[in-house]
């Protein structure tokens, strides 16, 4: 293995270790926001179309 490659891999591993908690936090926030938006959309849909949940109605 070349010295440049080894130093690049070590720098990449150090950067990954340093930024992994921040990336995880951002992904959790995005996932939480997506869940809230999806739940709000479902709630709004059922509020406007209450019969849409009946088993007799098929779309």
Image (cartoon, helix red, strand yellow):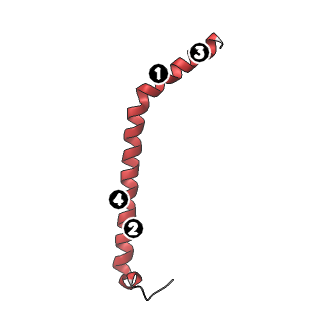
Determine whether the residue tagged by mark 4 lies in a helix, strand or loop. Answer: helix
Q: Residue at left 47%, top 27%?
A: 16
Q: Would you identify the image quadrant in which residue 20 lies?
A: top left
Which residue, given by chain and number where applicable, does mark 3 sit on?
Answer: 6
Observer-side mark, 4 or 3, equals 3
Of callouts 2 and 4, the N-terminal one: 4
Tag nearer the camera, 1 or 2? 1
Residue indicated by mark 4: 36
CB contact under 8 Å: marks 1 and 2:
no
Q: Which residue is at 41% across, 85% downward?
A: 55
For the residues labelled 4 and 3, say whether their Cβ atoms are less than 8 Å apart: no
Q: Is residue 52 above or below residue 28?
A: below
As drawn, which residue projects farthest toward the right?
2
Circle 1 is placed at which residue position? 14
Q: Nearer the viewer, residue 16 or 48?
A: 16
Gap in Å between the C-alphas at discs 1 and 2? 41 Å
Task: Choose top left, top right, bottom left or bottom right for residue 38.
Answer: bottom left
The residue tagged 2 is 41
Q: Nearer the viewer, mark 3 or mark 2?
A: 3
Callout 1: SS: helix
């Amino acid at each position: 293995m070349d010295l440049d490659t080894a130093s690049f891999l070590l720098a990449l591993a150090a950067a990954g270790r340093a930024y992994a908690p921040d990336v995880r936090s951002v992904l959790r926030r995005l996932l939480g926001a997506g869940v809230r938006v999806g739940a709000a959309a479902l709630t709004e849909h059922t509020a406007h179309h209450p019969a849409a949940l009946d088993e007799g109605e098929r779309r």
